[in-house]
Image (tube, helix red, strand yellow):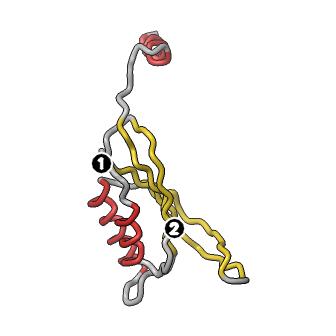
Amino acid sequence: MPGLLGLVLLLGGGMALAQYEAHIHFLVVPQTAAPGMKYAEAMDSFQAALVKLAGGYTELGFGSGAAQAKKKIHRMQNVSFMVYAPRDVTVDLVKLIKKYFAAKHPFVLHWKGSATLPPGR
């Protein structure tokens, strides 16, 4: 019964959650490392750089996509990530993607929101 009481209090507003301004970034990296690097090395270094830049990341996993390239459709295999930071780090993310992966035009989507924990936790 104590568990049910806690749930009722939580749902009933008995507990307020803190809200922090969030800069959310969705990014896609190709499954091809930058020239001179092995893919595992590139991914490990990239993930470490994300932790240093924003305090952490969420890897959404492997996927595939397509983009219009001149008059053809260019298909690619990729890995998607979400990063939450205290500021817009889009420019930094683009630089990191170019450093570690074969990506001429990295894709990073940014928007503002709120979070229940501060960045880097």
Disc 2 is placed on an element classified as: strand
Q: Is residue 108 left or right of residue 44?
A: right
Q: Nearer the viewer, residue 39 or 68?
A: 68
At x 59% / y 73%, what residue is drawn?
A: 77
- Crowd band around label 1 with a 10 angstrom C-alpha radius: few (<14), some (14–19), many (20+): some
Splitting the image into 4 quarters, where does residue 2 fall? top left
Quadrant of the image containing the C terminus: top left
At x 44% / y 13%, what residue is drawn?
A: 9
Percent of width and height locating residue 113: 45, 42
Can you say whether 89 is above or below 38 in the image?
A: above
Residue type for callout 2: Phe
At x 43% / y 79%, what residue is drawn?
A: 39
- Marks counted in the figure total 2
Tag 1 residue: 120
Tag 2 residue: 107
- Crowd band around label 2 with a 10 angstrom C-alpha radius: few (<14), some (14–19), many (20+): some
Tell whether label 2 touches label 1 (CB within 8 Å): no
Percent of width and height locating residue 52: 26, 60
Percent of width and height locating residue 55: 29, 53
Residue type for callout 1: Gly
Splitting the image into 4 quarters, where does residue 74 fall? bottom right
Which of the marked residues, 1 or 2, is nearer the chain's N terminus? 2
Q: Which label lies toward us, 1 or 2?
A: 2
Could you tell me how far apart the alpha carbons at marks 1 and 2 are, in whole angstroms? 23 Å
Disc 1 is placed on an element classified as: loop
Q: Is residue 49 left or right of residue 93?
A: left
Can you say whether 70 is above or below 26 in the image?
A: below
Farthest left residue in view: 52
At x 32% / y 48%, what residue is drawn?
A: 86
Farthest right residue in view: 71
Residue 63's disc number: none
